[in-house]
Image (cartoon, helix red, strand yellow):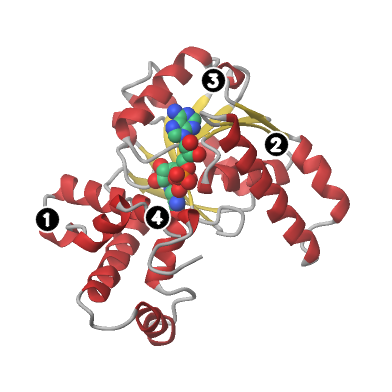
Amino acid sequence: MKKICVIGAGTMGAGIAQVFAVNGYMVVLRDIEQEFVNKGISIISKNLSRMASKGKLEEVMIQPILSRIIGTTDPADAQDCDLVVEAAVENMKIKKQIFSELDNICKPSTILATNTSSLSIAEVATATKRPDKVIGMHFFNPAPVMALIEIIKGVATSDETFDAVKALSLDLGKQPVQVDEAPGFVVNRILIPMINEAAAIYAEGVASAQDIDTAMKLGANHPIGPLALGDLVGLDVCLAIMDVLYEEFKDSKYRATPLLRKYVRAGWLGRKSGKGFFDY
Ligand SMILES: NC(=O)c1ccc[n+]([C@@H]2O[C@H](COP(=O)([O-])OP(=O)(O)OC[C@H]3O[C@@H](n4cnc5c(N)ncnc54)[C@H](O)[C@@H]3O)[C@@H](O)[C@H]2O)c1
């Protein structure tokens, strides 16, 4: 694989594009508005400069890395890509529209991966005529830093597709784990209900946001508190995942705490909107 298309230049898409470009791949980074594409590329540029200032990247490498990323709003630019990683919003209808369009645009050999946090790979695959080549490639936030990639096989995903994505993940210096399709996969099935519980504890007034996070950092040895982590992930993303877990399992233990929904309705999405459980 040489050329990768990343759909969505938000929190995850920008990070994923950076990971591929740093590792020598050509990247097409697509969003719906040029403004969003530019924002994604500027985040990558700042990340690379920060890496250089910390001595983690040679300054002279920044320009060649950035020149491997082509920003676009034109879906047709995915046509000669070997792999597409979709990182648009966590919404099945939108993902299916994107995959159906990609299926028509991309060459038959192209693998279509989704970075979904919780949605069914098999269902996304039904929007295409190549369900064997549809797979979950789940990066973690921030993608350039986090070592894990969950590779999720839908019922129709072929072993060849899995093997190709696994080899690619290793080439990116990441650690892949194989996961069978299940709501929330492994990490988010554990992590997001924990963030939701922290929000419920905060809503009940049991402790301040700061103290809840301090408690989990020092009492459970977590590197970041659950509320700060929710703000980093995006409260809209956390809510969407809780809703998927609840819908899929119909188990009340996955009920989103009303405060989380209230914040999302108010546009308090965490870091990306400047306000969540904390101010940014
Ligand atoms: N935020 C996280 O910590 C995290 C971690 C792992 C996976 N994910 C998953 O990654 C995906 C993206 O999440 P995010 O946090 O980056 O969201 P985000 O809101 O930061 O970015 C989403 C981007 O997709 C763009 N977009 C929407 N529809 C599009 C379309 N039709 N074509 C192209 N671009 C489109 C939006 O304009 C936006 O820029 C979701 O499926 C999410 O569940 C998120």
Looking at the picture, which amino acid does disc 3 mark? Pro
Residue on which disc 3 sits = 75
Residue that appears at 18% across and 51% down? 246
Q: CA distance from mark 3 to mark 1?
A: 39 Å
Q: CA distance from mark 4 to mark 1?
A: 25 Å
Q: Secondary structure at mark 1?
A: loop
Tell me: 192 left or right of 133. left
Dot 3 beta carbon under 8 Å from ligand 1: yes
Which label is found at residue 269? 4
Q: Do tag 4 and tag 3 residues touch (Cβ < 8 Å)?
A: no
Looking at the picture, which amino acid does disc 4 mark? Leu
Indicate which disc, 4 or 3, sits on the residue closer to the N terminus: 3
Task: Decide if residue 160 is in sight here.
Answer: no
Indicate which disc, 2 or 4, sits on the residue closer to the N terminus: 2
Q: Secondary structure at mark 2?
A: loop
Q: In the image, which is nearer the foreground, mark 3 or mark 1?
A: 3
Residue on which disc 2 sits = 25
Q: In the image, which is nearer the foreground, mark 3 or mark 2?
A: 3
